[in-house]
Amino acid sequence: MGSVGRRRKDEVIKLFGERVSPAKVRFFTAVGLDFVPGRREGVWYWDLDGRKLMDCHCNGGVFNLGHRHPEIVRRLREAVEEVDIGNHHLISEHRAVLAEKLTDTMPGDINRVVFGVGGGEAVDFAIKLARGHTKRKKIVYAKGGYHGHTGFTLAAGDEKYRKPFEPLAPGFVEVPFGNFDSLEKAVDKDTAAVLFETIPATLGMPLPPPEFYKMVREFCDERGALMIMDEVQTGLGRTGKMGYRALPRHSRCNCHVEGTFRRSLSNFCNMLQRGLG
Ligand SMILES: Cc1ncc(COP(=O)(O)O)c(C=O)c1O
C-alpha cells in the first residue's frame, strides 16, 4: 500500500483535530470543506472518500504545473538515485546551475539567487538586503499586500495579522496601493526600500495605474531607495508571463531587489535545491 488511503477519511480528520489543529477541523467542517486530498494527478484531486474534484485553488500558486507532473516525478526519481540533501555550507553544482537558469530569465543586472524555503523568508531577506545595502531603515509598503508571517513581513502586513504579535520591528510605513502621491510623501532620505506585491491577491487582485511601477522605479532611483517586488504569487507565469515580464514593458527597468518567486518553484526547483543541494 502506498502513502495515500491508509486511513479512512473520518480517522484522518479526527487525528488532524487532535494533533494538528482542532480549529481548522471545526472551520472546514462547518463550511462544508472537510475535503482531505488523497490521490492527485494533473488538475485532479480525489477526496479520501473517493469524490473527484478539479483543483482550481492551485494552493496559492504551488501547483502551476499540476499535481505530480510526470516529468517532474521522473526527474526527482532520477535525482534521488544519485544525490542526497547535500551540505548547505559547501559549494553546490545543483544550486549553481539552478541559479543560472533562474537569472537567465531575469532582466538587467539581476544575476544572483538566494535560496530560501518560503515566501515570508524571501521578503524578509529582501528587506535585510535593502537595509544592509543602503544603511537606511525605513521600509514603505502598500496597504493590502500580503508578504507572509515572518518577522519583517508581519510588520509590512495588514493590521489584523500583525496586531497579535506586537511589538514588531520599527521603521515600517504604510501607503495606499497604487497611489503615487502618497508614496512620494512617504519616501525620504532614510527610506531603504519600497515593497509591493505586484498584483495584491488579498486586496482583490487590483492592477495599479498603467505607469505606476515605472514611476516608482524612477522615483526610487532618484531617492536612492531600492524597489522590492514580491512575486511569490505572480512569479512563475501565473499572469501568463515569467514574473517580472508580467509588468508593462516600460516598467522593466532593473529592480535591485526583485523576484521572490516561491510558490511555483516549490513544485520543482525548491524541492531540488533543498533535497539535492
Ligand atoms: C504575495 C505573497 N508573499 C508572501 C507570501 C508568504 O509566503 P509563505 O507562506 O511561503 O511564507 C505569500 C503567501 O501566500 C504571498 O501570497
Image (spheres, grey):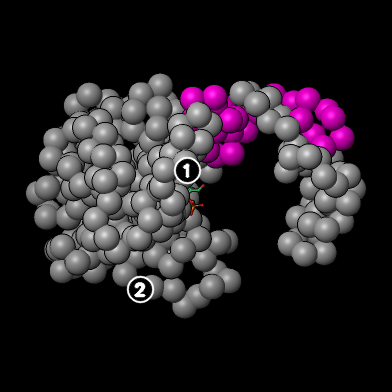
Q: Residue furthest bottom?
A: 167
Return the mark for residue 170.
2
Residue found at x 43% / y 54%: 85
Is residue 185 in view from this perspective? no
Q: Is residue 63 magenta?
A: yes
In the image, residue 161 above or below residue 104: below
Residue found at x 60% / y 30%: 67
Estimate the spatial distance between the alpha carbons at disc 1 and disc 2, rounded to whole Å. Answer: 44 Å
In the image, residue 41 above or below residue 2: above
Which residue position is annotated with label 1?
Answer: 80
Residue found at x 40% / y 27%: 237
Residue found at x 44% / y 73%: 168
Magenta-highlighted residues:
46-72
Q: Amino acid at mark 2?
A: Pro
Name the quadrant of the N terminus: top right
Q: Position of residue 201 (x, y in %)?
A: 50, 39
In the image, residue 219 above or below residue 26: above
Left or right, 188 with respect to 198, comes to left
Q: Position of residue 110 (x, y in %)?
A: 18, 42
Is residue 81 in view from this perspective? yes
Return the mark for residue 115.
none
Q: Nearer the viewer, mark 1 or mark 2?
A: 1
